[in-house]
Image: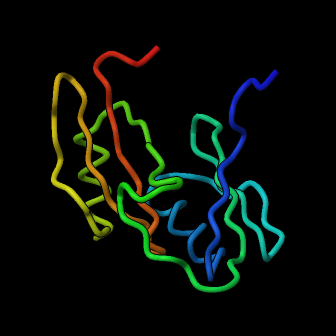
């Protein structure tokens, strides 16, 4: 039976550049690099596979069908938000705090939607 999600793939016109952004902006590390495919790993062990894209991307909004965002959990929302703001990322929303859940949405350089989140009480 399935025990978890090992990685999620993102197709990018420049995998090297996007992988480096995840390293410099979010603290991931590169743990595999073939030149066309780069795996980056978060401190908790989850990974993104960044592959070379082909063709044109279809425009997508925050609620169009398909994979819409990657949620990135943090222990200190305010500190993480301040660090990300220093990197001049494009924010889609203002930070919010609702019922002990702090969130904000932003994009990586390729326009993929990322969701920074800190839950006072973890789900499940």
Q: Is residue 17 left or right of residue 106?
A: right
114 over 44 or under it: above or below: below
> Is 45 or 116 nearer to us in this picture?
116
60 over 13 or under it: above or below: above
61 over 115 or under it: above or below: below
The quarter of the displayed image where residue 29 is located? bottom right
> Is 83 or 68 nearer to us in this picture?
68
> Is 104 or 31 nearer to us in this picture?
104
Residue at image coords 80%, 76% = 35
Instruction: Tell me which colouring the rendered structure shows.
Output: rainbow
Q: Position of residue 124 (x, y in %)?
A: 47, 14
The quarter of the displayed image where residue 121 is located? top left
Q: In the image as oriented, which residue stretches furthest toward the front?
A: 65
Q: Quadrant of the N terminus?
A: top right
Q: Position of residue 83 (x, y in %)?
A: 30, 54
Q: Position of residue 91 (x, y in %)?
A: 25, 63
Q: Is residue 120 left or right of residue 35?
A: left
Q: Position of residue 10 (x, y in %)?
A: 62, 63
Residue at image coords 30%, 34% = 76
Residue at image coords 24%, 52% = 82
Residue at image coords 26%, 48% = 104
Numbered circles on residues, count: 0
């Amino acid at each position: 039976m399935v025990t978890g999600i090992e990685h999620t793939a993102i197709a990018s016109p420049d995998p090297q550049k996007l992988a480096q952004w995840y390293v410099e902006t979010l603290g991931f590390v590169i743990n595999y690099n073939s030149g066309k495919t780069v795996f980056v790993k978060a401190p908790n062990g989850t990974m993104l596979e960044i592959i070379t894209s082909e063709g044109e991307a279809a425009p997508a909004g925050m609620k169009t069908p398909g994979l819409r965002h990657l949620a990135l959990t943090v222990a200190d929302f305010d500190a993480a938000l301040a660090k990300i703001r220093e990197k001049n990322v494009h924010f889609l929303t203002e930070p919010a705090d609702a019922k002990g859940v702090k969130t904000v949405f932003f994009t990586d350089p390729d326009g993929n939607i990322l969701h920074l989140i800190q839950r006072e009480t973890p789900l499940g």
